[in-house]
Amino acid sequence: MDYKIAVIKGDGIGPEIVDAALPVLGAVGKAFGHRFKYEYLLAGGAALDADGEPLPKKTVKKSKDADAVLLGAVGDPKWDSNPGDKRPEIAILGLREELGLFANLRPAMVYDELSFACPLKPEIILGGLNILIVRELTGGIYFGKRGTEIIGEASAFSKIVDHLKGEKTLPPGRFAYDVEQYTEFEIKRIAKVAFEMAMKRAGRVTSVDKANVLDSSRLWRAVVEEVHVQYPEVKLEHLFVDNAAQQLIKNPKQFDVILTSNMFGDILSDEASQITGSIGMLPSASLGEGSFGLYEPIHGSAPKYAGMNRANPVATILSAAMLLRYSLDLSAEADAVEKAVGDYLRAGYRTPDILTEGKIPVGTEECGRRIADFVKKA
Ligand code: IPM
Ligand code: MG
């Protein structure tokens, strides 16, 4: 069958890791008789350079026309001093919002071959680690009202400022706010995703919030409990986010699915990825209501390694596998890619980020080629 994939290479190492992943999709196409048609689009710094906009309208429109989006990474310190609406990150946030991608799936697992890379004591991850973080992606503090005001000066938002500071008299000077907010609707739909995922895994959901302090978290907890009623087979537990951060280090194996808000998910997913010790290996999927989704490695654009043919493209390759599984409903094809990554590691190939004594060093391009070869052999 024919499939249309929007490809956004982005900045830094983005182009190289995507270029290494496409041959793997090519091999899948050959082996299974599919045709992947790519539409190359700009976003992030690359789009700022070309159009002066981090997220051109065309990119949004063409992405919507595709079956799925594969993204490398965006961002470069070059644009750090740009105003908020002209930063490369706007591209990511805008795509998530415009494409309705409210569910972010971030697996964190340890490969047997790479367990040495885990910075924790070996016994803590003995027997493997396989966590799936389900992060709410289009709500919360990321998309709540925000602003910077000067106390005492009238502005269009004075009413909001008055409301936020309540009875308090604030000292004169600058004042900034970002509102954490959730509707029942938003919590319900992300909770469903987490329970559905848990049904296909070990059947456990840990919902992470700060219900001892935040109203939005108390609503979160209540709604998650309500949705849980439809999933009696799944074991549900609640943790406060500070405790969750601690438990992730102390005993990460206790977790199956972690369900959490946009901001907490951002932080905990970085923490979880660090535990695996191989950030260059972890993929992610951002999904909406239907099968459409955006797939990207969890790591960033690593500008200092750009153009050096040394970045690890495995996270992007595994993101492509998630794309096959979730957006194109091609699970045998996804399995083949994941198996090929395992074969590649077992054969001893290593990009510089995970290279150890006695292994075979490869660059970005060769990594993609080797994995594509393993797909062909399957
Ligand atoms: C992530 C990133 C983004 C986020 C940034 C780049 C906006 O950190 O995908 O985790 O905070 O969501
Ligand atoms: Mg992040």
Image: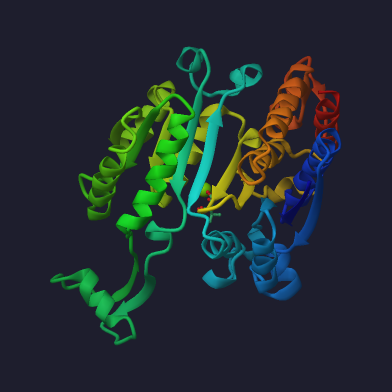
Residue found 81% across the figure and 42% down from its top: 34
**Viewer can see residue 29:** yes
Q: Does residue 217 appear left or right of residue 137 in this picture?
A: left
Image x and y of residue 104, in percent: 51, 47
> Could you say where residue 16 lies in the image, as x and y percent from the top left?
79, 47
Q: How is the image coloured?
A: rainbow
The residue under the point 20% across, 44% down is 212
212 w.r.t. 318: above or below: below
- Quadrant holding the C terminus: top right
Front in this rendered view, residue 23 or 233: 233
Image-quadrant location for residue 308? top right
Return the residue nearer the eye: 78 or 20: 20
Q: Which residue is drawn at 30% across and 56% down?
A: 184
Q: Is residue 237 left or right of residue 273?
A: left
Q: Name the residue nearer the viewer: 90 or 198.
A: 198
Q: Give the residue at the far front of this rendering.
A: 1
* Rendered location of residue 6, percent (x, y): 72, 57
Provide residue 83's location: percent of width, then percent of height: 55, 72
Above or below, 191 against 184 in this view is above
Residue at the (41%, 29%) spot, across then down: 248
Please say whether residue 308 is visible from this viewpoint.
no
Above or below: residue 270 compared with residue 170: above
Q: For residue 86, which quarter of the picture?
A: bottom right
Q: Determine the residue located farthest toward the left in the rendered image.
A: 167
The total number of labels drawn is: 0
Q: Left of 252 or right of it: where is 3? A: right
